[in-house]
Each structure stands twice: as C-alpha cells, then as structure tokens.
Image: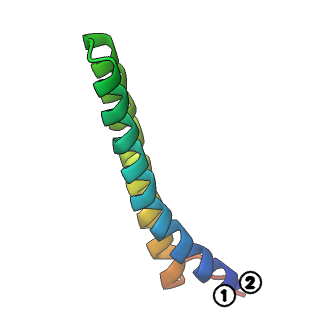
Amino acid sequence: MNSIKRIAGILWILMGPVAIYYLLQTAIAEIAKKPSIETKVQWAVFVIIFLPIAIGLVIFGYYAMKGEYDEQI
C-alpha cells in the first residue's frame, strides 16, 4: 500500500503543473474571445481560487512521495 501511495504522489506532483497550464490557457482563450470586464473578473477569480489548489496538489504529492503518509504499524 505504501508503494501505491508513493506512486500516487508522483502523479499528484505531475497533475499540479498540468492543471495550472490548462487553467491559464483556458482563461487566456476565454478572455481573448470576449474581452469584457465581466469575463476578466470572472477568470481572475477562477485563477486566484484554483491556483493555490493546484499548488497544494504538488505539495501533497511531494509528501506522499516522501513517505509522510505511510502506515506506522
């Protein structure tokens, strides 16, 4: 089970930057499609909310890969 947690940690670490990339790519595309202030504010809120979540994925994955969540029996 501990090896599965470590492998999952690597996947979490990889998912963080991918999520950030797609979030920013989508935000830029949507703002370019409709450059009104409402769209800019909406996507700014999305980025501000989801950027720390994606960074948290990387941190969680790092600790999982490091073995912090291994069973201590």
Q: Give the residue at x 52% y 67%.
A: 12
Secondary structure beneath label 1: helix
> In which image quadrant can residue 39 be found?
top left
Q: Give the residue at x 31% y 25%.
A: 31
Dot 2 corresponds to which residue? 1
Q: In front here: 67 or 24?
A: 24
User: Identity of the amino acid at label 1?
Assistant: Ser
Residue 3, image x, y percentages: 66, 87
Secondary structure beneath label 2: loop
Above or below residue 73? Residue 41 is above
Whether label 1 touches label 2, CB < 8 Å = yes
User: Identity of the amino acid at label 2?
Assistant: Met
Q: Give the residue at x 25% y 12%.
A: 37
Residue 59, image x, y percentages: 41, 65
Residue 7, image x, y percentages: 60, 81
Would you call the spot at circle 2 few (<14 residues within 10 Å), some (14-19), or many (20 or more)? few
